[in-house]
């Protein structure tokens, strides 16, 4: 492989790892918000602002 090939391979691997990291952080944030909303809305059933999607 030439230097260009190695650089492209390393760049591709770094972009994949960055994408995986971002996906995990977004999923964890969504999951935490969803659980908080579920717990809050289970305690107050009559609240009109509790819409679980």
Image: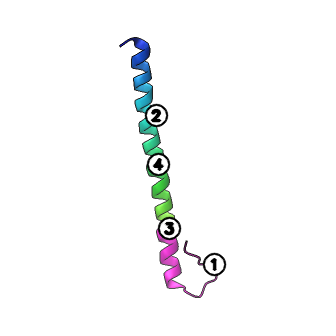
- Tell me which numbered mark, 3 or 2, is placed earlier along the sequence: 2
> Which structural element holds mark 2?
helix
Q: Are marks 3 and 2 in contact (CB under 8 Å)?
A: no
- Residue lying farthest right? 48
**Mark 4 surroundings: few (<14), some (14-19) or many (≥20) residues within 10 A:** few
Furthest toward the top, the residue is: 2
**Residue in the image at 46% along x and 51% along y:** 25
Residue 8 screen position, x and y as percent: 44, 22
Highlighted magenta segment, given as a residue range: 34-53
Report x, y in % for residue 31. Answer: 46, 62
Real-space Cα separation, disc 2 to disc 1, in angstroms: 40 Å
Q: What residue is shown with label 1? A: 49
What residue did someone put label 3 on?
34
Q: Which residue is mark 2?
A: 15
**Was residue 47 drawn as part of the magenta stretch in this picture?**
yes
Q: Is residue 39 magenta?
A: yes
At mark 1, the secondary structure is: loop
């Amino acid at each position: 492989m030439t230097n260009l090939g190695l650089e492209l391979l390393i760049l591709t691997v770094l972009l994949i790892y960055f994408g995986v990291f971002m996906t995990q952080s977004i999923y964890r944030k969504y999951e935490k918000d969803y659980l908080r909303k579920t717990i809050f809305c289970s305690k107050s059933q009559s609240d009109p602002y509790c819409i679980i999607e």
